[in-house]
Image: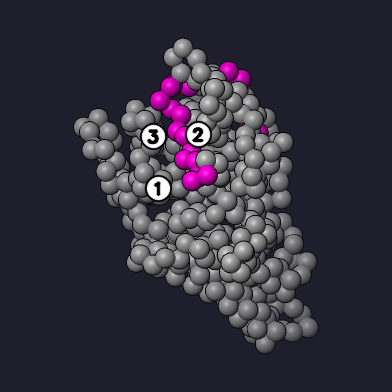
Amino acid sequence: MTVTSERPVLAEVDVSDEALAAVTAEVAQTAAEYDRSGAVPQAGLEAAHRAGLLTATVGAQFGGPGLGLVDTARVLAALGEGDASVGLLAANNLNTHQGQAANAHWPTAAYDDLLRRSQAGPALVNAIRAEPELGAPARGGLPSTTARRTTDGWSLSGRKAYATGGTALAYHVVWVVTDEPVQRVGHLLVPAEAPGITWVETWDHLGLRASNTHDVVYDDTPVPLESFVEIPRGADGVYRDPAAVAGPGSFGHPALYLGVARAARAAFVAYAQERVPAALGRPIATTERIQGVAGEIEAQIAQAEALLFGTLLRLEAGHDVGPQLSVVKVQIARSVVAAVQTAVAALGNPALSRTNSLERHFRDVQCVRIHPPQEDTALLATGRRVLGA
């Protein structure tokens, strides 16, 4: 697809360490406020938008920067370090643009509309897949949400759970089955202002409280005919969820939690340097106990960074690491969780107080395990592959 004169041309982005650090600092200013209110983190999203980070993976053929895997992970780590909820919203958005750049499947008019909205301000898009009864699609099963053929398109009906982004979304990518004689499974690309969409505020979570991951109900929502994108069947004719196995585009989520671990490290260091117990008479950062803990935190973060960026560099170099991607994600998750938990355990009560940002980082990092493929399924599939089962 070629760029037309009508399509907005998105600016190049500055992904230097200095530029990303500046965005991290700006996003972090309001992270605690949005964590407490649960509102859409608009200030953080605006900061990311001004820096061009929300559209950094828009393909060059669509007038975008076409950021690669490594730099995309750097962007998401920077946003996650500032505010994990902003990082999650950005990760979902960048993954969508990345998928479109690799395999154009959106109708031209719809994608041009998304880009125009993205030029004007934060225009988020996310895959709306989970359902209250089905649970996580990656664990098998088909959706009950239905796309019914009409004379001029589709009518969408059903209820989805964990629809991250909530009312901040510009487009919903809704996982559905069709009501055709030969049933098909795929996604409907739905503009957020379409009629028949109702949000149900169900999100009251331990972490990522500002991510607005609410339920959404579609009641005969009209969608254009060309907005249905079928998921390819397997060689055996069976539909399988693409998220059941990690792919190159699925490393945005662990990247944002690496950012959370970095933020926890910074909070730990600041507290250790400032805390001077009366009995000690000097900062606890001068003690071997705290110095050893800092070393352990750094070891866990270094391991996560090496796994994340090393794997992405190998992918960009053309190495076949696909079979290992799911367990690499597992190991990154283990490392970032361990880093934050180590910091919290060492400081005790102060680290669990809401006056200390470590408490928020501890809650947010737990969510790294939620994203598919989850640890048990990844280890089982890998074990079977290794054993030839």
Query: According to the image, label 3 marks what residue?
Result: 106
Look at the picture and state if 67 lies above or below 181: below
Residue 278, image quadrant: bottom right
Query: According to the image, label 2 marks what residue?
Result: 187
Label 3 secondary element: loop
Q: Residue 86 in the image: x percent, y percent?
A: 53, 48
The residue lying furthest to the left in this view is 5
Residue 123 seen in the figure: yes
Query: According to the image, label 1 marks what residue?
Result: 98
- At a point 53% along the width and 34% down the height, the residue shown is 185
Look at the picture and state if 278 lies above or below 120: below
Q: Is residue 148 magenta?
A: no
Residue neighbourhood size for the residue with mark 3, other residues' Cα within 10 Å, grouped as few (<14), some (14–19), many (≥20): some
- At a point 41% along the width and 56% down the height, the residue shown is 72
The residue lying furthest to the top in this view is 151
Query: As drawn, is 289 to the left or to the right of 118?
Result: right
